[in-house]
């Protein structure tokens, strides 16, 4: 793309980075920003220093999924000697395990833990909080339970920032996030919005780049209302991507004119790299993750008559991505319609295994899009060239979440998603650990509702996890522990219509869970539980439900 200059009215709004931050970040403000790979990294890289230097207090930052270990989240814990030596146990968000290992290592070193706790204390003292519908590894770290922590920080043991008064979770479905975040009653509750856009093309269009999600809709609200400050990073390193029809991923520069006239537009010229996962995040999976992915792929191959030709969707997490990677070596062919686009789905497309996609028009009609892939955001690894592949790629459609992550889009699809725990009632936990929010619901529940009409869904689960005390525990349980966030309920797993089929997949096999009564469901999930825990689960099945397994 030839980079075209921004128009004069916008150029007059360009200012040095520090001056721009001074205009936007002030005590008592509520500030929303782009999420994940559309995160304004240039802002968050220096925001904590600015907060301390300017003595900022009472700040509400509304953001979803920090991509980097910013000092804003971790303070001086990043400076601890040996922080990146060794690897902590992988978190439930598999593809973020590289970042999670680095971040979690902080809590296993006394110096790092002390600095982290001190940072949390300063965040609380300054009344700086994060309001978020989906969190990542840099804010979901749980203070471990050991002799040292019980002595030094007894009030924090077993808690992460969601139970420390720092992160305020907003439990909303991804495509419904804009109203709760910024406009709960039609009027703004945010004072400023910060986003990243590409420079304009020859038609004056600026692109949201690697992720639309809620950004496009939120920016539309800001520009239409004219009563919220806007800070735009114009970054030529962001890939230029398009939407589809009236579900645009671009915005014309002229739409910024009114906000500029009101003195509410701030522009910063920026060349910060696109946020990405750490290098090799997909390259070093655990044996458990590999086994689960292989079970999914084998099942797809064995049931080719019903799985081939469908539009595939992969959820947020490493296991599903590994399954997509493994499909490259199979005979599978189909289409793609997904929440998240990652490198391996693009590999399938480039190999000719993905023939196209579809889009749901506002009136509900499904339009076939041959030679396209539809998503609402994308993510790649550092240095893997993925974002270069996205740039000006006519095959990529990056639509807003409220137009992509809707049930109708996933009817009769093929979904591969992840979770953290399942119980005998069919309750699914995909977003919590030890009464703490761990990630969020995202688009998972809505996607699953779409698959319930004629679709095939694989729910991937590691059969065990480590407790706060380091002991092995079963991820399949009779009842969810008190305080567990629930993402799906029994009818979501045992129901479905028009031939829908759902499967629970662990490293120990594949179990069909749809179409079951509770007794059949209990037998199915126990069949793929870890062998070390099956006896206790069989006992619980009889004790609580009089079900013999």
Image: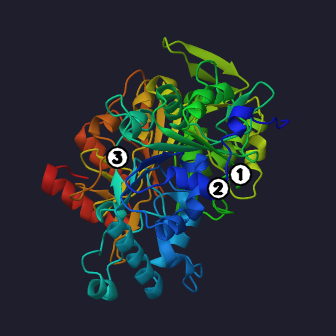
x and y, in percent, of residue 430 in the image: 39, 50
Neighbourhood count class around disc 1 (C-alpha, 10 Å): few under 14, some 14–19, many 20 upward: some
| Depth check, front residue: 329 or 15 | 15
Neighbourhood count class around disc 2 (C-alpha, 10 Å): few under 14, some 14–19, many 20 upward: some
**The label number, if any, that marks residue 17 in the structure image:** 2
Q: Is 199 displayed left or right of 35 in the figure? A: right
User: Residue 10's image quarter?
Assistant: top right
For marks 3 and 2 on the same chain, the one whose residue lies earlier in the sequence: 2
For marks 1 and 2 on the same chain, the one whose residue lies earlier in the sequence: 2
Q: CA distance from mark 1 to mark 2?
A: 9 Å
Mark 1–mark 2 contact, CB under 8 Å? yes
Q: CA distance from mark 3 to mark 2?
A: 30 Å
> Which quadrant is home to the N terminus?
top right
Q: Evaluate whether residue 298 shows in this view.
A: no
For marks 1 and 3 on the same chain, the one whose residue lies earlier in the sequence: 3
Residue at screen point 60% across, 63% down: 285
**The label number, if any, that marks residue 270 in the structure image:** 1
Mark 1–mark 3 contact, CB under 8 Å? no
**The label number, if any, that marks residue 170 in the structure image:** 3
- Residue 100 to residue 523: above or below: below
């Amino acid at each position: 793309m030839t980079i075209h200059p921004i128009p004069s009215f916008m150029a007059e709004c360009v200012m040095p980075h520090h001056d721009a931050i001074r205009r936007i970040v002030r005590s008592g403000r509520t500030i929303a920003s782009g999420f994940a790979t559309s995160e304004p990294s240039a802002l968050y890289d220096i925001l904590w220093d600015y907060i301390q230097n300017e003595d900022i207090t009472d700040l509400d930052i509304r953001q979803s999924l920090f991509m980097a270990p910013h000092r804003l989240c971790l303070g001086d814990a990043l400076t601890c000697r040996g922080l990146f030596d060794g690897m902590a146990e992988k978190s439930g968000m598999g593809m973020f395990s590289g970042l999670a290992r680095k971040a979690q290592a902080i809590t296993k070193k006394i110096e790092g833990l002390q600095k982290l706790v001190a940072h949390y204390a300063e965040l609380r003292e300054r009344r700086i909080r994060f309001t978020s519908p989906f969190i990542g590894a840099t804010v979901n770290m749980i203070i471990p339970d050991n002799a040292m922590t019980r002595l030094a920080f007894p009030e924090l043991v077993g808690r992460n920032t969601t139970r420390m008064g720092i992160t305020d979770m907003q439990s909303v479905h991804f495509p419904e996030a804009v109203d709760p975040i910024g406009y709960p009653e039609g009027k703004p509750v945010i004072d400023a919005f910060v986003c990243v856009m590409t420079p304009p093309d020859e038609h004056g269009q600026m692109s949201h780049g690697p992720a639309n999600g809620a950004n496009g809709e939120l920016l539309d609200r800001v520009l239409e209302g004219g009563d919220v400050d806007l800070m735009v990073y114009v970054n030529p390193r962001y890939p230029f991507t398009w939407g589809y029809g009236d579900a645009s991923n671009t915005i014309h520069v002229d739409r910024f004119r009114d906000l500029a006239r009101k003195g509410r537009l701030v522009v910063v010229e920026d060349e910060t790299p696109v946020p990405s996962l750490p290098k090799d995040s997909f390259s070093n999976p655990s044996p458990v993750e590999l086994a689960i992915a292989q079970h999914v792929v084998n099942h797809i191959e064995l049931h080719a008559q019903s799985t081939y030709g469908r539009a595939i969707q992969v959820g947020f997490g490493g296991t599903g991505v590994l399954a997509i990677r493994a499909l490259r070596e199979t005979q599978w062919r189909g289409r793609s319609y997904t929440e998240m686009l990652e490198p391996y789905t693009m590999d399938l497309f480039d190999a000719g295994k993905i023939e196209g996609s579809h889009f749901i028009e506002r009136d509900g009609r499904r339009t076939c899009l041959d030679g396209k892939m539809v998503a609402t955001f994308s993510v790649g690894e550092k240095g893997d060239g993925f974002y270069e592949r996205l740039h000006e790629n006519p095959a990529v459609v990056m639509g807003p979440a409220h137009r992509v992550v809707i049930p109708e889009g996933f009817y009769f699809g093929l979904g591969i998603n992840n979770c953290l725990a399942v119980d005998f009632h069919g309750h699914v936990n995909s977003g919590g650990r030890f009464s703490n929010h761990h990630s969020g619901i995202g688009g998972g529940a809505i996607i699953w509702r779409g698959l319930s009409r004629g679709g095939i869904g694989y729910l991937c689960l590691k059969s065990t996890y480590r407790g706060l005390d380091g002991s092995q525990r079963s991820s399949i349980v009779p009842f969810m522990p008190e305080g567990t966030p629930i993402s799906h309920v029994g009818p979501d797993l045992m129901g479905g219509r028009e031939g829908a089929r759902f499967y629970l997949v662990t490293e120990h096999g594949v179990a069909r869970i749809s179409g079951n009564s509770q007794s059949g469901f209990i037998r199915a999930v126990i069949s793929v539980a870890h062998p070390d825990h099956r006896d206790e689960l069989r006992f619980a099945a009889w004790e609580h439900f009089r079900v013999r397994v």
